[in-house]
Image (cartoon, rainbow, N blue to C red):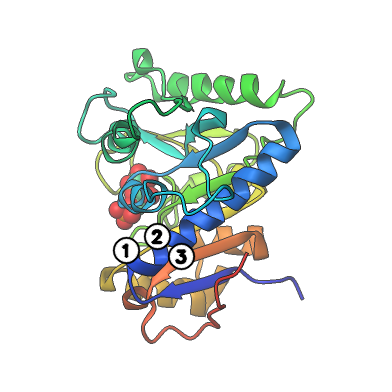
């Protein structure tokens, strides 16, 4: 039987989840650097950037605990079709929560925001973002799908991840790497998103979900599995043991699914 997603549950976000997430991300970073000298990561918006900042802004505990920012290529797992300085922009959120808080003198990562010239044409916006991936991951002719070293994803209370929503036709997309959506049930309606094949193809996929507000959906994801059809559960099914969930106890209280002790 295929191995299942790892569920790591912690009593406290700040004291336990954040240091574990940091260790996990650094381990993915080191594997990426060993493979191709850069670390290619895509991040979500929502609550993720704040928790990520709690993890990555911690002071290093030793030489093996270094975030090598200048080696990071950061993409967005999904983005809203709004200007880059808009409160709804995932880029803006990551910048505000994390990138602007890097200690002075830190060598900067390479960040790939959407091309805001194309906000009025979401297909073009998605195509341009796919082209940015093509450039980074070599040509589409030679690469069937981009392989991110790590995807850092959130999970909405309805089970959506990236801008892949339950029951939406986008879940059936098999050829595009990046797709537009104009009818997101969560505002704003116009967005672009990595597609499910790209998400499940990553070397590692880490979800972060915290708080009692996520409890009901966590039950559905982990107890019903892919049969329940929620996008997060489809990612779990596609990525198997390459998917890891970093959650607090509040989010998974009463959820029947084996927790693993966190280790690398
Ligand atoms: O709209 C979005 O929501 C999801 C989940 O957000 P959360 O606040 O419930 O964590 C997020 O992962 C995605 O990037 C964002 O565009």
Q: Which comes sooner in the sequence, label 3 or label 2?
A: 2
Q: Which residue is mark 2?
A: 18
Tag 3 secondary structure: strand
Residue 172 seen anywhere in this rendered image of the structure: no
Q: For the point 36% across and 51% down, which residue is it?
A: 48
- The N terminus sits in image quarter: bottom right
- Mark 1–mark 3 Cα distance, whole angstroms, equals 12 Å
Badge 3: few (under 14), some or many (20 or more) residues near its Cα, within 10 Å?
Answer: many
Across and down, in percent, residue 15 comes to 34, 67
- Say the numbered circle drawn on residue 246: 3
In the image, residue 77 above or below residue 38:
below
- Say the numbered circle drawn on residue 14: 1
- Mark 3–mark 2 Cα distance, whole angstroms, equals 9 Å
Across and down, in percent, residue 215 comes to 33, 75
**The quadrant where residue 81 appears:** top left
In the image, is 94 to the left or to the right of 146?
left
In the image, residue 240 above or below residue 255:
above
- Mark 1–mark 2 Cα distance, whole angstroms, equals 5 Å
Q: Mark 1 near mark 2, Cβ–Cβ under 8 Å? A: yes
Tag 1 secondary structure: helix
């Amino acid at each position: 039987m295929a191995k299942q997603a790892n569920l790591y549950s912690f009593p406290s976000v700040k004291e336990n989840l954040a240091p574990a997430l940091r260790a996990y991300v650094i381990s993915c970073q080191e594997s990426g650097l060993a493979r191709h000298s850069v670390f290619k990561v895509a991040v979500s918006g929502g609550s993720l950037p704040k928790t990520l900042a709690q993890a990555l802004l911690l002071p290093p505990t030793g030489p093996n605990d270094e975030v090598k920012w200048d080696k990071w290529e950061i993409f967005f797992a999904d983005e809203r079709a709004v200007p880059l300085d808009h409160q709804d922009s995932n880029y803006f959120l990551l910048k505000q929560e994390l990138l602007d808080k890097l200690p002075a003198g830190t060598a900067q990562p390479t960040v790939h925001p959407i091309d805001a010239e194309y906000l009025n044409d979401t297909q073009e916006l998605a195509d341009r973002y796919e082209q940015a991936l093509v450039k980074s991951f070599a040509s589409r002719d030679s690469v069937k799908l981009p392989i991110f070293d790590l995807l850092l994803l959130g999970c909405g209370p309805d089970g959506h991840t990236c801008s892949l929503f339950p029951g939406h036709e986008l879940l059936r997309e098999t050829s595009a790497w990046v797709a537009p959506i104009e009818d997101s049930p969560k505002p704003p309606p116009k967005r672009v998103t990595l597609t499910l094949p790209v998400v499940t193809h990553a070397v590692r996929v880490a979800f972060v979900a915290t708080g009692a507000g996520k409890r009901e959906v966590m039950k559905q994801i982990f107890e019903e599995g892919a049969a329940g059809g929620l996008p997060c559960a489809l990612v779990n099914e596609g990525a198997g043991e390459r998917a890891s969930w970093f959650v607090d106890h509040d989010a998974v209280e009463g959820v029947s699914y084996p927790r693993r002790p966190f280790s690398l």
